């Protein structure tokens, strides 16, 4: 199992000291990261990743609202092979026609991405699960409108906050899901209450097992009340130890 770290988790530290933060991530034991809004930091970030032997198989960028050619060029320079749009607000997920329009835009982005050798995906929050369209969650309705080349990164914590069972949702979405965000906590919108993997209410190991076509599991905290470096280290240690045990079994 491959684990990565969504660098948004460390956004404050990155703003203060990008090279030092990336070095700490490598020292903790991560070999992969998932950059966010990487266009503006591509040169400095690329240097830091190279110096610390870190790969970036995926990255977050606002494909549906910013210059796609610029995003894909920066992704290529960083070795990012899948660019994931991280966020569309709740109002985009209430009507079938709005979701259809979003899917069409992402499908078009995927065609442009393919010209650069880059795959495109989407990452959910809670509202795509809270909204129901024609008897299904908006996320599942959306997934059926996407071209086969477009992938999903399911944020399993926000699925649960949105009132759905992440194991069941992953099972229904099937091989469309190539990435998941792994986080834990009390299953509410208080992001500072999020916890290291294995410490909250998410059945993290069952969730990982449910993603049958998973390429990378991405550790993330939207926020954290404690020392965030300790939090990500705890998550990685838990995941590494427990998924290794499951593999033996």
Image (cartoon, rainbow, N blue to C red):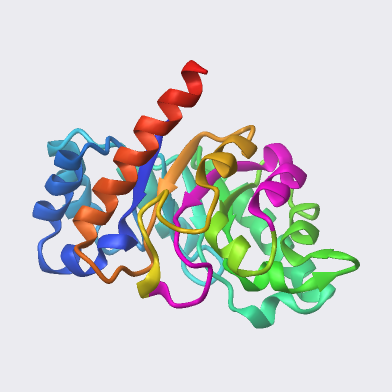
| Whether residue 203 is visible | yes
- Magenta span includes 54: no
Residue 59 screen position, x and y as percent: 41, 51
Residue 78 screen position, x and y as percent: 31, 44
Query: Residues in magenta?
Result: 165-191
Q: Image point 74% across, 54% down: which residue?
A: 143
Residue 125 screen position, x and y as percent: 57, 67
The outermost residue toward the right is: 134
Does 116 appear above or below 20?
above
- Quadrant for residue 124, please give it: bottom right
The outermost residue toward the top is: 248
Depth check: give the residue in front, 249 or 232: 249
- Quadrant for residue 90, please give it: bottom right
| Whether residue 114 is visible | no
From the viewer's perspective, is 157 left or right of 199?
right
The outermost residue toward the bottom is: 91
Depth check: give the residue in front, 228 or 113: 228
Does 191 appear above or below 39?
below
- Magenta span includes 168: yes
Does 58 appear above or below 245?
below
Residue 230 screen position, x and y as percent: 20, 54
Q: Image point 58% across, 73% down: which residue?
A: 88
């Amino acid at each position: 199992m491959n684990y990565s770290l969504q660098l948004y988790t460390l956004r404050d530290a990155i703003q203060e000291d990008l090279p030092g933060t990336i070095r700490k991530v490598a020292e903790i034991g991560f070999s992969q990261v998932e950059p966010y809004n990487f266009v503006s930091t591509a040169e400095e970030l690329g240097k830091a990743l190279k110096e610390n032997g870190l790969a970036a198989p995926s990255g977050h960028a606002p494909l549906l609202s910013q210059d796609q050619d610029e995003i894909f060029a920066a992704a290529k320079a960083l070795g990012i092979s899948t660019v994931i749009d991280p966020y569309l607000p709740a109002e985009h997920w209430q009507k079938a026609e709005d979701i259809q329009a979003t899917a069409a835009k992402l499908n078009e982005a995927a065609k442009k991405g393919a010209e650069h050798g880059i795959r495109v995906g989407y990452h959910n929050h809670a509202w795509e699960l809270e909204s129901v369209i024609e008897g299904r969650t908006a996320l599942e309705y959306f997934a059926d409108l996407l071209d086969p080349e477009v992938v999903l990164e399911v944020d399993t914590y926000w699925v649960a906050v949105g009132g759905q069972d992440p194991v069941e949702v992953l099972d229904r979405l099937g091989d469309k899901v190539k990435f998941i965000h792994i986080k834990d906590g009390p299953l509410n919108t208080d992001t500072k209450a999020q916890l290291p993997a294995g410490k909250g209410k998410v059945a993290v190991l069952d969730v990982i097992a449910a993603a049958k076509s998973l390429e990378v599991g991405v550790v993330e905290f939207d926020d954290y009340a404690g020392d965030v470096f300790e939090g990500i280290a705890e998550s990685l240690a838990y995941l590494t130890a427990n998924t290794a045990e499951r593999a033996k079994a």
